[in-house]
Image (cartoon, grey):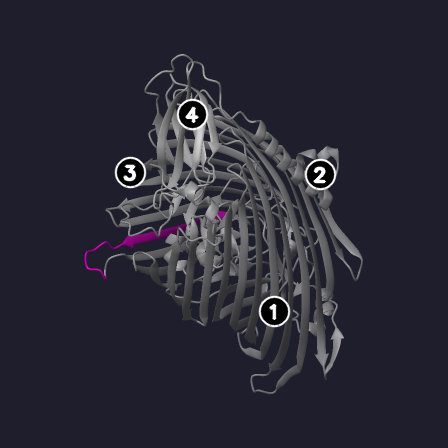
Amino acid sequence: MKPVLALLLVTLFATSVSAQENAPRNKPAAAGTGKLFGRIVDAKNNKGIDAASVQLFQKKTDVLAGGMLTKANGDFDISNISTTDTFRLVATAIGYAKQELIITFDKQAKGGAPVEKDLGNIKLAAESQYLGAVTVVAQKPALQMGIDRKTFDVEKNLASAGGTGIDVMRNIPSVTVDVDGNVLLRNNSPQIFVDGRPTILTLDQIPADNIERVELITNPSAKFDAASTGGIINVVLKKNKKLGLNGLVSAGIGSPEIYNGNLALNLRQGKFNFFVNGNYNQSGGRAKSETYRINKENGNVENYFNQFAFTDRSRKFHGVRFGMDFFLDNRNTFTLTQNFNAGKFGSDEEQNQEYLDINKQAEHFGLRTSGSQGQNQRSSTQFMFKHNFVESGKSISADINYNHGTNSDNTNILNTYAFPNGSMYANDSRVHNSGSGRNNQVTFQVDYVDPNGENDKLETGVRTYINDFNSTFNAFSVNNGSEIKLPLSNNYKYREMVNAAYVTYTGKLLGIGYQAGLRAEHSKFDGELVDSARKFGYQFPKQLDNIFDALFPSLYLSKSVGEGQELQLNYSRRIRRPDFWQMNPFVDINDPLNIRQGNPALRPEFTNSFEFNYNKTYTTGSFLGVIYFRNTEGDITRYSDTITAAQYQQLNNAAIDPSAILNTFVNAKYQNRWGSELTLQQKVGKNLDITPTIDVQYKKVVSTVNNVDLSNEGFNYEAKLIINYRVVAKPAFWNKWSFQATGGYESPEVIPQGKRKEMYGIDLGLRKEFLKNKATFTFNVNDVFNSRKRGTINDTENFYQDSYRRWDVRSFRATFTYKFGKTDFQLFKKNGGGREENEDRD
């Protein structure tokens, strides 16, 4: 495979260079001939800018009349142009603001002699925040709402400063985080990308200070991975391209046991842009969970069980990210990025258990203590190439991503039992678990974009994704110092491969914009339990008869209905493939009354998604209204039941209770979800803006397991309110303070066999800018009332259980950040031979 990839990259590069060499620089003039010349210089120091792009367009037709890249001293000249036309000259350079000029010739050519026009120095201003004190009159809102996506500016999110990607997600409209730290978009599991590509990093391994923005795409087109039934959340990391040396340093401290630090450096000089970032993040906390259960037989109450648990967690992450951009010229860019991350996790849990009879009198008590330690290492390598053709917007790009990760963990569990009088009820039991895993992912992708006029555009591409994973888990019963291996041990491996190709065409017909697309994907999953040689998996499509399982069409229609108003109707078909934890037959016994296990027989689910959007933008804000419907065939959902006698016998030495509940996953027949989401962004006066969001859904699940009807239906809703206030006052101390409050509420939601309970929370943040906006102090409180806990009620013939768990607890965090930069910093000094060329023009 490597030679093929290398050959393809070389071919792309050769094609781009050939296209550049053969592209017409200047069109022959229709009338008298003229020549333009001048110099592109830095507005601050009047030094010539090397490799700046100068393009000349005919003003009336916007046809390219000529162009070139400037010489080392900034000089350019464009010949053989008509002296009777009016032109628009566009000068651009990376790290500088664009400059446009309207050009006409004052006199016509006589006797065939060309007319020359000297444009003098054309000054470009550096795009830098550090050129001096700047008074900001209007600020871009934190949330940019478009018809197809929402973009959230993380720098304006005060509540997540010094935190992780999980803290960022909690403060974004339409996004929620469950008790295990899993992110949900409109109550669906989205696909998480980092810089537009798959990642093995978890969001709590990505510092919030390293994230530039987050993009939410609720109904992706055929251009995107078909395995995005729940939408896409794309995390875009910071990478500065400003001229010279720029940097950011931050440090923070908080409670419980919160420490964080971050250093980012960027150097942009000539054809190179270097960047490096290092970070450290640590947090702790003591979380509480509770379980209240009624055990039944044939619908009649048998006994009761209560459990109260406290967990002390410790998480430590550190990482480094570095790379470079090489601008071969104005049309060809190479980018290489390398990322290394590592994490350590620790937890000590204490579970107090009450076993009660039918009269709620104590029969006996249990105490379960456990301690676990784990660690992981992650690395990610990305190589990208992009070529921009002469035609505006036309490009081809190729990239290779390689992700590698390892993990290991160890857990020791002690169970003790006693009668109410303190005497021993049963012998103590000890269990020791150890596990390790290795993961390798490779993604190769090529994309081609070809605009045709103002409204039409063709996009096409191919993609290959390969994911190799293996996991070893060993569980031992410990008696008198000797270990007996338990049947729940397993050695598991799998390979997942997805090959895809897509094409979309964008155009306009009768005033209605459209984008039609089709994506074809062939997916294969091969899993194996190595010790038993048991194999499982799936392949779609398996034969030509079910070729539709590999096709994913999309259609977008849009129309402007007035100034700042747009309507859109869209449709897409997607797939959600079961992940590792949903298929892995490994049994998680951390909670002996609520054990969890994957289901190797799971099949992918398919979703048909429809959305109708209305977007209105006005002077003081914007409004986005969405009505949507989703039909999911084979919906992957949770299923719970008490363990069978055979299962209990297999797990007996693992100290599992005979009435334990086994939580797993099944394919429902289908799920239908109707909903409406309304988002308003409103500026009130000069300093206050509010962003309320509400999402109302009606959900119906139809499912039958073991001849038991698990169907359920009902309403649920989510609401979130973000308030920002910025102080602008004459007293220096009060000036440039910013305050932010974010509140969210999730109503109860139906699930098969029960419902999820409500959840709510409030985050607060404040920020002070000083030292000419170079320094900031941020203080935030996450979960002010310590109320974020995820609860579930399960009601079946065999049991009724009301429980809740927590992921994080209330935290306080203070962070100091300082930005610095020097636009004329040069790491590589030019030789003296080039001095004369860089002198100012008269």
Q: Residue at x 70, y 34 (%)?
A: 547
The residue sitting at 45% across, 53% down in the picture is 826
Judged by its main secondary structure, the magenta piece is strand
Quadrant occupied by the C terminus: top left
Mark 1, residue position: 374
- The x and y percentages for residue 732 are 22, 60
- The magenta stretch is 714-733
Q: What element carries label 1?
A: strand
Label 3 – label 1 distance at C-alpha: 52 Å
Q: Do the residues labelled 2 and 3 touch (CB within 8 Å)?
A: no
Disc 4/disc 3 C-alpha distance (Å): 33 Å
The percent position of residue 14, horizontal first and vertical second, equals: 64, 35
Q: Residue furthest left?
A: 730
Q: Reading the chain from its start, which is encountered first: label 2 or label 1?
A: 1
- Tell me which amino acid carries mark 2: Pro
Label 2 and label 1: CA atoms lie apart by 39 Å
- Inspect the image, locate mark 1, and give the three-letter code of the amino acid beneath it: Gly
Nearest the eye: 452 or 749: 452
The tag earlier along the polypeptide, 4 or 2, is: 4
Residue that badge 2 annotates: 541
Which residue is outermost to the right? 533
Judge the density around disc 2: few (<14), some (14-19), many (≥20) Cα neighbours within 10 Å: some
**Are circles 3 and 1 on residues that touch, CB within 8 Å?**
no
Residue type of the residue flagged with mark 3: Thr
How packed mark 3 is, by other alpha carbons closer than 10 Å (few <14, some 14-19, many 20 or more), is: few
